[in-house]
């Protein structure tokens, strides 16, 4: 499976560590829990970054990183029926629990979670503490830029 991550160039060296998610938390993890957030396509990764940008402020230092997950790495999928109604409108503790428990349980290195930005699409969480994580290959960062029309 090929997945994608977009980040600022200065964080590219740490893209596989989950350090940002550990420091600040995310939709699917609490602060203190390492998770690497990726998306099933470069387009979805771009949307996920775009919805978190300051309005009208086009960053000039983004990079994309292709990530390959070999077929030998087991992938788990979050059950949509387990999510609270309106889950996509919040980032509260009720959602952190899903990722935190997945990381602590250590069953898989990969978890598919639904995208809040594009419902019907899936993001991919990676657990850098899992034994199979070392089989996941992060490629070199490539420059990434949004089309200027998105910021008019």
Image (cartoon, grey):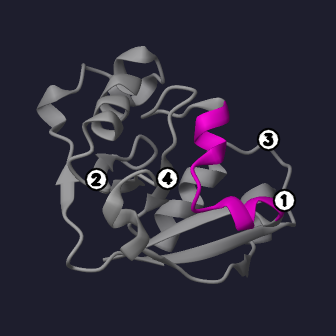
Q: Which residues are magenta?
A: 10-23
Tag in front: 4 or 1:
4
Residue 19 is covered by the magenta coloring:
yes
Residue under numbered circle 1: 59
Residue under numbered circle 3: 54
Q: Which circle's residue, 2 or 4, is located before the other in the chain?
A: 4
Label 3 neighbourhood size at 10 Å, few (<14), some (14-19), many (20+)? few
**Drawn side of residue 59 relative to residue 39, left or right:** right
CA distance for labels 3 and 4: 20 Å
Q: How many marks?
A: 4
* Residue 142 occupies quadrant: bottom right
Label 2 neighbourhood size at 10 Å, few (<14), some (14-19), many (20+)? some
Label 1 neighbourhood size at 10 Å, few (<14), some (14-19), many (20+)? few
Tag in front: 1 or 2:
2
**Drawn side of residue 102 relative to residue 136, left or right:** left
Residue under numbered circle 2: 112
Residue 37's disc number: 4
Judged from this view, the residue extending furthest toward the front is 131
Q: Main secondary structure of the magenta part?
A: helix
CA distance for labels 1 and 2: 28 Å
Position in image of residue 92 (x %, y %): 46, 17
Q: Which circle's residue, 1 or 2, is located before the other in the chain?
A: 1
Residue 19's disc number: none
Q: Which circle's residue, 4 or 1, is located before the other in the chain?
A: 4
Quadrant of the rendering where the N terminus is positioned: bottom left
Rendered view: 4 above or below 89 = below
Determine contact: label 1, label 3, CB under 8 Å.
no
Q: Which circle's residue, 2 or 3, is located before the other in the chain?
A: 3
Query: Mark 2: which secondary structure?
Result: strand
Please name whichever residue, 93 or 17, is drawn nearer the observer in this view of the structure: 17
């Amino acid at each position: 499976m090929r997945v994608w991550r977009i980040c600022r160039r200065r964080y590219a060296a740490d893209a596989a560590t989950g350090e940002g998610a550990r420091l600040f938390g995310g939709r699917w993890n609490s602060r203190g829990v390492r998770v690497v957030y990726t998306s099933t396509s470069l387009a979805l990764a771009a949307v996920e970054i775009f919805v978190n940008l300051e309005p009208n402020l086009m960053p000039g230092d983004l990079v994309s990183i292709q990530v390959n997950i070999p077929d030998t790495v087991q992938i788990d999928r979050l059950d949509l029926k387990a999510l609270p109604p309106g889950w996509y409108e919040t980032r509260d503790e009720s959602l952190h629990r899903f990722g935190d428990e997945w990381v602590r349980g250590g069953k898989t290195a990969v978890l598919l979670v639904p995208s809040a930005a594009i419902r019907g699409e899936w993001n991919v969480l990676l657990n850098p503490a899992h034994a199979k994580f070392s089989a996941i290959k992060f490629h070199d960062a490539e420059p990434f830029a949004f089309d200027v029309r998105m910021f008019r």
